[in-house]
Image (cartoon, helix red, strand yellow):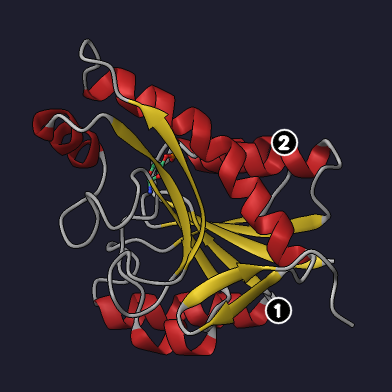
Amino acid sequence: MLKIAVLISGGGTNLQALINAIEGKELAAEINLVISNKRDAYGLIRAKNHRISTEILDIKKYPLREERQKALLQLLLDHKIDLVVLAGYLDILSEGIIKEYENRIMNIHPSLIPSFSGKGFYGERVHKEAIRRGVKISGATVHFVNEETDGGPIILQEAVAVEFCDDEESLQKKVLALEHKLLPRAVKLFAEGRLKIVDDRVEIINEIES
Ligand code: GRF
């Protein structure tokens, strides 16, 4: 069974979507660990409600970023994690972790990458900019993580219409609904061995390779 670690910093609605998919038997995987860099992240309560182990790696415990990242990698290795899912995790992973878990770290981003992505585009800023720019569609992207912020191979994307009356809050709500479908789907494809990376692009293959 695929062992997943989910990294969070906040509400954890995407973590909840993964928990629901697993408990609903749509996804054959196991969340072994939820790690937060924020002590008060509500996602930690969600994990506890489902008896999932949690770890807090915050600035108080590890003031140095380097030490924090070292502890994170050790946790992933100790738990024999196969796939790391960044679900609203607001810290940058060290090169060491990205290398060790090459093509085994996924991130969910609340826009159609490459629009409204990269350095500085996180949280509400993404939707605020989309509204300000007046785009007619936005959406969500699940991608593999490489050393470039939001720059790794794209696994799944889906679009949503942006109406003139939308504001950042209503757009965020629409996009989150998409995210909750896309993330479990991407993890399922990974678990089934159906994601193949070819020249920085992801091919979704229909058959499980032996
Ligand atoms: C989501 O919009 C995700 O795309 C972004 O951070 C947000 C996390 O939301 N990376 P939640 O904590 O899963 O509710």
**Residue 71 position (above or below residue 162):** below
Task: Choose between 202 and 117: the one closer to the eye.
Answer: 202
Could you say whether the residue bearing mark 2 is in a helix, strand or loop?
Answer: helix
Q: Which residue is mark 2?
A: 20
Residue 38, percent across and down?
36, 50
Q: Decide if ligand 1 comes within 8 Å of the CB at mark 1.
A: no
Q: Which part of the image, by quadrant, shows the C terminus?
A: bottom right
Q: Amino acid at mark 2?
A: Asn
Answer few, some or many: residues within 10 Å of disc 2's Cα (few below 14, many 20 plus, some between 14 and 19): some
Q: Which residue is mark 1?
A: 80
Residue 54, percent across and down?
58, 54
What's the distance in space between the residues labelled 1 and 2, CA to CA? 23 Å
Answer few, some or many: residues within 10 Å of disc 1's Cα (few below 14, many 20 plus, some between 14 and 19): some
Residue 134, percent across and down?
14, 29
Q: Is residue 178 left or right of residue 30?
A: left
Q: Residue furthest top?
A: 165
Residue 59, percent across and down?
27, 63
Q: What is the tally of numbered marks visible in this picture?
A: 2
Q: Quadrant of residue 20?
A: top right
Quadrant for ligand 1 reads: top left
**Residue 177 position (above or below residue 84):** above
Task: Choose between 113 and 181: the one closer to the eye.
Answer: 113
Q: Residue at x 30, y 69 (%)?
A: 92
In the picture, the disc for residue 202 is none
Could you say whether the residue bearing mark 1 is in a helix, strand or loop?
Answer: loop
